[in-house]
Image: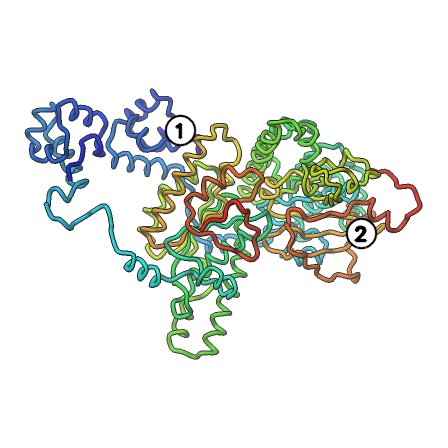
Amino acid sequence: MQREVGSLPLAPALRAKLVAAGFQTAQELLETGPCGLSKELGISKEEALEALQVVRQECPGDVARTAGGSGITRKCTALELLEEEQAQGSIITFCSALDSILGGGVQLTKITEICGAPGVGKTQLCMQLAVDVQIPECFGGVAGEAVFIDTEGSFMVDRVVDIATACVQHCQLIAEAHQEEDHLKALETFSLESILSHIYYFRCRDYIELLAQVYLLPDFLSEHSKVRLVVVDGIAFPFRHDFEDLSLRTRLLNGLAQQLIIIAHDHKSAVGDVVQITKSEGVNHTISHYISWLPRCAASSCHSKCRRY
Amino acid sequence: MAAKKLRRARLSQELCERLSRHQITTCQDFLCLSLLELMKVTGQSYYDVQKLLCRVSRACAPKMQTAYEMKLRKSVNSSSAFLSTTLHSLDKVLHGGVPCGSLTEITSPPGCGKTQFCIMVSVLATLPVSMGGLDGAVIYVDTESAFSAERLIEIAGNRFPTYFDSDEKLFCMTRSIHLYRELTCGSVLKRIMSLEEEIISKKVKLIIIDSVASVVRKEFDTKLQGNLAERSNFLARGASVLKYLAEEFSIPVILTNQITTSLSNGPAIQADLVSPADDLSLSEGASGSGKKESGCVTAALGNTWSHSVNTRLILQYHDLPTRQLLVAKSPVAPFSAFFYTIEKSGLVLQDGKDQTNLTWEGTNPALQTIRVRNTALKDTLPDAALPSATD
């Protein structure tokens, strides 16, 4: 694959020098070697070496000259994808009607959007999901942790305590009914304190803090590899006021949505974001282009324009 | 946080100077640019720019806390998590009372008791902690000039006769209620922005704004183009500052709101401009089909505002003189209704009346219909002339 020099992620000044010196493909760069490059471009040998390392990272296929190895694009057959999708769990809510509507629960590696009128229960559902993601595997859950990004300040710890206590009691009832070894063992670690300690809460006061937090999220998720759910409660709220430049707002929201998709896929977690219902649908339209599945919650009144399959 | 200068984000000096040549001085400017623009402006490679982004983000991002730490912190000072309203059934349903750290809204038709409730709660906030109060000062922003100091003393004397037995105690209480009269949107917003220092210096434990709706509806006529956006802007900005104050100092913030009539097909009409004698259901709707447009009376200021407040209490008429208090939106309480009357000592709940927990039938909670006085009166006095809606 002969990759063009102009598409390499080098510093713009260096790129300009390469193009001016007549280099056209990455292969030519690699053939010249660092000393030759430094003489031709007038840069130091260390800089030339750095540039070559970047090129090698970008185009591993050229260097190794192997036919199969593809570092960046992943390809697989639809059958492999189907098996993968069926094998990974979903976050159950212990509410059988809701779980059956969602096809087993809230799916991992996908973004789920929850929208509704004020007061209908969006934050309640998010808090419930943050507790339910931690249900041990023997009860049907995914035994993961949760990240809760709050932009509206509606996260009430007391309510989460209520939900968590009820969830633990529910699991205890199941364990008593079935009397299996692993149920009882799982219950030892599944307690109110452990549930609360595994909900990581970030309070973002404006859209800049939200953007900053989403940029830092991949690093956070690599440190806390057990996180299986990211909830953004109120993705629309910080963008709804004080924005004269609507095109900037659209661009920032698109960027956010794309980053969340990457996070959801790479870290095999579910991302739920909550959108408010309003009469003007500008914000909702932008987000819904990237949503792959919208839950049909019986309790919420979804705006018709946001439904996507 | 957004206005944090890049210098303080630990970027190198020459990089900061280079960025300031392109008018990028704060974290906000930096994070709003796309990656390509950043590469052009900083002159660095893709991976280096990503590292820079992470560094700047770390300077702006909020601190992480686990839910467990939050619970521990709350349980350490559990007494100050709520302001008890001394209406026992209401406090039980709300898990303690008006919650600290979030916005509570009281909505009602005129004359139902919003200002009475606010005055009563201001007295409660000044009481010592042993009596269920917050032992602090109160900031009362009054836009309708409805606050009456005499009523304040009457409520205090009648509700807590054993505590307020001397004039000294009454004066002490009235000295800690700071009243601000603001008559325009701009001055209300300026006042809200300046509250941070006052809260610290005067040891304020409660903020009341009575009422948000009156200034907003006076100045923003939503029929004019562009006004709706400006109004939402103003409301959202006010709400976010108030939320910040409430959370930062862990104090309750109470706001009052008015009602509006939302017709099913047309825009909302300001209810106070429509005289009670008008039967809105007979007016020709936008469809013009002659079908009866059923209008319902709901809280004013629109959906954006309904999203911003965390708890909403609705006061409405039931029959003379009983009124009803509904908990329409709350993160901890189910939908419930209570009957009350207004007496010398403020609001008094009527226990023992029909307190069946009403389950509301799945309508949009933001459009919770509110009973206005004229419909109640129409039932009881069909022949008498209707009095004016504002007493």
Q: What residue type is labelled 1?
A: Asp
Res. B1 in view? no
Helix, strand or loop at disc 1?
A: helix
Residue A162 position within the rendered picture, expressed as x and y whole percent measured from the top left? 54, 61
Colour setting? rainbow
Task: Of the two numbered discs 2 and 1 on the same chain, state the one appearing first in sequence.
Answer: 1
Q: From this viewpoint, which residue is outermost toward the front?
A: B289
Rounded to the nearest angstrom, the CA distance separating label 2 from label 1 is 54 Å
Q: Is residue B230 left or right of residue B261?
A: left
Residue at 47 percent of width and 30 percent of height: A246
Q: Name the residue under label 2.
A: B318
Horizontal relation, residue B379 to residue B203: left or right: right
Is residue B125 left or right of B81 when viewed as pictured?
right
What numbered label is drawn on residue A42? none
Numbered disc total: 2
Residue that extends furthest to the top in the rendered view of this protein: B21
The chain to which mark 2 is attached is B
Mark 2 crowdedness (10 Å alpha carbons): few <14, some 14-19, many ≥20: some
Frontmost residue, B139 versus A194: A194
What residue is shown with label 1?
A: B29
Q: Which of B147 and B222 is in front in this view?
A: B222
Q: Are marks 2 and 1 on the same chain?
A: yes
**Residue A187 x, y percent position in the rendering:** 42, 70
The amino acid beneath tag 2 is: His
Describe the element under mark 2 as helix, strand or loop. strand
Pick whichever, A279 or A208, lies toward us: A279
Image position of A271 with respect to A208: above or below: below
The chain under label 1 reads B
Instruction: Tell which residue pokes out farthest to the right in this image.
Output: B383
